[in-house]
Every structure is written in structure tokens, then in C-alpha cells.
Image: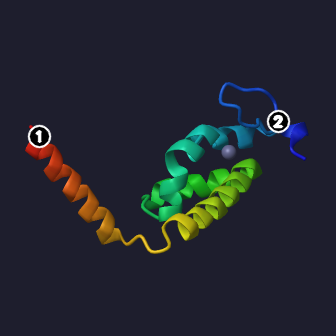
Amino acid sequence: MWQDDLHDTADGYPQRATSEGNAQLGRVTCKQFIEDFLADYLDATLGPEVVADLERHMAICPPCVAYMNTYRKTRHLIRQEAAPEMPQEMKAILRKFLQEQLAREQ
Ligand SMILES: [Zn+2]
């Protein structure tokens, strides 16, 4: 349904017709949005300025919103199936264990 807006670009993100839209899209590219920020955005670990940029991007870039919704659902399912209760401290313990193992080998 977005075919009319999708043109081939280097980043593969849709160029909107309005110049205003392009300027705003240029601040955060779809590639950055998906590869660099999406996971952190959902974890709410980003600063308010970055979040504002991402929300501006989402307001004018429905494909990214669709991708985020799919990603969030998938991640939720993966968490439910693979790690129903993977507590934060468990991750910390695992990381500490690995660091100790590595330190011993040196
Ligand atoms: Zn986008």
C-alpha cells in the first residue's frame, strides 16, 4: 500500500513527496531507526532528544512504525517462549561469570 511512496534510495527508505518530509527524514534515516535505535527505543534507554527525533520520524514514516510494531510483537513472543523470566540480575551474573572466566585465561 506504500508502493506509490517507495522509490529506490541508497538507504531503501521511502522518499516522501514533500520537501519538509525529506528534511525530517534526513535527521534519522530508516536504517538508523531500525538498526541503531529501535531496540533502545523500546527499552526506553535513549535520551529525550533522540526519542523526539525518532517520534518525529515515526510521525512521517509509516513503514518504520509498521516495522516497529512487528519487531515489538516478535520480541515479545520470543521473550515469552525462550525466556519467560530472564531477570536483569541473571544477565549481570552471566556477564560477571564470563568476565571472570576471561580474566582467568589471561
Ligand atoms: Zn523510516
Disc 2 residue type (three-letter): Leu
Residue at position x 67%, y 25% in the image = 10
- Colour scheme used in the picture? rainbow
Q: What is the secondary structure assignment of the residue under circle 2?
A: loop
Residue at position x 82%, y 35% in the image = 6
Disc 1 residue type (three-letter): Glu
Left or right: 94 as drawn, with respect to 49: left
The quadrant in which the C terminus is found is top left
Q: x, y percentage for residue 52?
A: 55, 58
Residue at position x 71%, y 36% in the image = 13
Of callouts 2 and 1, the N-terminal one? 2
Q: Which mark is residue 105?
A: 1
Q: Tell me the distance, in whole angstroms, between the alpha carbons under discs 2 and 1.
A: 52 Å
Left or right: 89 as drawn, with respect to 1: left
Q: Nearer the viewer, residue 71 or 78?
A: 78
Q: Nearer the viewer, residue 22 or 63?
A: 63
Give neighbour class at mark 1: few <14, some 14-19, many 20+ (Cα, 10 Å).
Answer: few
Residue at position x 50%, y 44% in the image = 36
Left or right: 16 as drawn, with respect to 101: right
Q: x, y percentage for residue 104?
A: 9, 45
Give neighbour class at mark 2: few <14, some 14-19, many 20+ (Cα, 10 Å).
Answer: some
Task: Tell me which image quadrant ligand 1 sits in.
Answer: top right
Q: Which mark is residue 6?
A: 2
Q: x, y percentage for residue 93?
A: 24, 64
Q: x, y percentage for residue 99?
A: 18, 50
Query: Is the residue under label 1 in contact with that under label 2 (CB below 8 Å)?
Result: no
Q: What is the secondary structure assignment of the residue under circle 1?
A: helix
39 in relation to 105, above or below: below
Which of the 4 image quarters holds residue 65?
Answer: bottom right
